[in-house]
Amino acid sequence: MPLAGFDIFLIALLVLVVLVFFAGVKTVPQGFNYTIERFGKYRKTLMPGLNFIIPFIDKVGHKLNMMEQVLDVPSQEVITRDNASVTADGVTFYQVLDAARASYEVLGLQNAILNLTMTNIRSVMGSMDLDSLLSNRDEINAQILRVVDAAAEPWGIKITRIEIKDINPPRDLVDAMGRQMKAEREKRASILEAEGKRQSEILKAEGQKQSLILEAEGRRESAFRDAEAREREAEAEAKATQMVSAAISAGDIQAINYFVANKYVEAFKELATSRNQKTLILPMEATSLLGALSGIGEIAKEAFSDDRRIDKSASGIPDTGGSDGENA
């Protein structure tokens, strides 16, 4: 049976209601935000999940990724403060914090971030010397990040990191830097070698100084001991002379013979032990040396006999038979 006009109207109305319902339901995936426009004007932002809008009046304006994203910065030439030309590239990490401002405050968000990063790379690196540029990469990253983040803040963007990947000087400049580094190392090696030689000479001079000091102290000690020995020898000589003088005063003629014989023997000894003496010629009076020696023997004999008498008298033994026999 053919459908009546009213039935067709109901079916069409039902289909229209279903279409309107699905047109008013919006599902936003996790990590994204949708901006809603009404008659071309921003109205609200849809968060992740199920959302409802007025069909045919409200519409989705922009779909923004709210996750942190990475943007490659292409290579570009930079002229440093000391007129060195280098090529540098990098990466930029950013995150959208406000979907509305990121959609309506700037046109072409990624292009704007890219150009902002590149211009600030040229500005920061161009204000530095080549040596500072190559050795202070962390400082360069921090300066660029601070400037770009402040410039992108009105767009609802947070610049999380900016990293310089490569800094490539020209080939001839690299070769010159290599020669400079080699010369610097050779200079340091020469300085260290000279310092080592200087230290060695100082230690050697210090050792010689100590050696001379010890040698001088040894000579001083030896001279002191020689002087002391000569002093004692002089004292002994003076004492011997005094004893001989006392013996002469007492009328002991043998003491004079002993004194003269002793001096005669010493003089003869020095003559015999002289280094330059090749031939020893004895004088005619050399036989008197034997007489002097016999005189010394007589003096010693008398001294020993006197000592024996003193010992016997001290022990209480009378001097009788033995002495008489010797006197006889």
Image: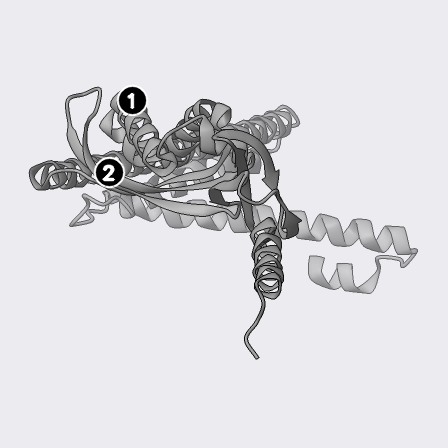
Q: Is 178 left or right of 47, judged from the image as shown?
A: left
Res. 226 in view: no
Q: Amino acid at mark 1?
A: Ser
Farthest residue, direction right: 316
Farthest residue, direction left: 172
Q: Amino acid at mark 2?
A: Ala
Q: Nearer the viewer, residue 165 or 104?
A: 104
Lower position in the chain sequence, tag 1 or tag 2 = 2
- What is the secondary structure assignment of the residue under circle 2? strand
Tell me how far mark 1 sits from mark 2, CA to CA.
12 Å
Image: 308 above or below 159: below
Farthest residue, direction bottom: 1
Q: Nearer the viewer, residue 194 or 312?
A: 194
Q: Position of residue 326 (x, y in %)?
A: 70, 61
Q: Quadrant of the C terminus?
A: bottom right
Image: 318 above or below 123: below
Per the image, the residue denoted by label 2 is: 88
Q: Is 227 left or right of 184, judged from the image as shown?
A: right
Marks 1 and 2: CB-CB under 8 Å?
no
Per the image, the residue denoted by label 1 is: 123
